[in-house]
Image (cartoon, rainbow, N blue to C red):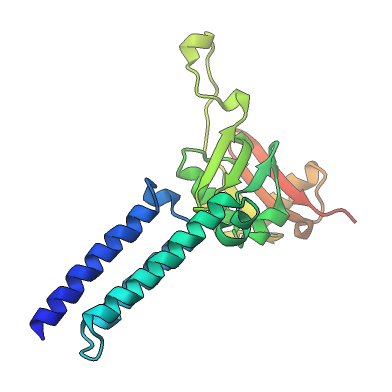
Amino acid sequence: METSITVKIICGLLALLAIIRLLGKKELSQITPFDFVYLLILGGLVEESVYDDKVTVWQVLYSVTLWAVLIYSIEKIVQRFDKTRPVIKGEPTIIINEGELDIDALQKNDLESEQLRTMLRQQGIFTISEVKYAILETSGQLSVLKHEQSSPVTADMLSINPKETSIAHLVIDEGKVQHKVLDMIEKDENWLRTQLGKLGYDDISKIYYAEWSETDGFTIHGVKND
């Protein structure tokens, strides 16, 4: 029995290595959900068969080989026929276009405002106002192009004294006031309504996204018109 398990594990390992090679020279961050699923299923096939006495080594090899051939065929189909790529592997989605947040794209990809902010912070961006374009890649990563005025230049190069910056806080999310955020910045809803009223926004429920920072004030997206 031990010999059978050993042979199955070795064969399974070699098969996994072969499938990983089929992915090409991708980083883990470049693996699409489709790639992840078929690797997961392959691992499940090997795991289920290792300790099952009724499953022979040849059956393991057949299952893994068949799965590998199917995956390889799909990869070649995607490479040969571009129209199949969006269906099988998905396609990038523009979330922010020319500085404007695309709410439909955000919702279509089941991406919440705070999730978007987290992805931006991971790239050193603490306010959406700095972003000119943001593209959600098929791997789930966010590619960002900043506005020209947000490009990383030094104050010495421009001979200026840059203004102070501060973190932007999400105060309205999908038309709802974020009371915990207001408490954190020592503000309240009355203050928020007053400040937005001065800017011409009287109905908070019509605002999809609003952030505020001490230095830059409000950045508002997705206002619904009557």
Q: Quadrant of the C terminus?
A: bottom right
The residue located at (24%, 91%) in the rendering is: 54
Query: Can residue 80 be seen here?
Result: yes
User: x, y (%) of residue 6?
Assistant: 13, 75
Q: Quadrant of the N terminus?
A: bottom left
148 vs 111: above or below:
above
The residue located at (80%, 48%) in the rendering is: 201
Hey, which quadrant is residue 143 in on the image?
A: top right
In the displayed structure image, the side of residue 92 where residue 119 appears, left or right: left
The residue located at (68%, 37%) in the rendering is: 99
The residue located at (23%, 63%) in the rendering is: 14
User: x, y (%) of residue 199?
Assistant: 79, 41
Hey, which quadrant is residue 122 in on the image?
A: top left
Of the pair 177 and 36, the residue shown nearer to us: 36
User: x, y (%) of residue 148?
Assistant: 61, 24
Query: Can residue 183 be seen here?
Result: no
In the displayed structure image, the side of residue 20 where residue 36 appears, left or right: right
200 vs 11: above or below:
above
Of the pair 189 and 6, the residue shown nearer to us: 6
In the picture as drawn, the residue positioned furthest to the left comes out as 2
User: x, y (%) of residue 73?
Assistant: 48, 61
220 vs 38: above or below:
above
Hey, which quadrant is residue 200 in on the image?
A: top right
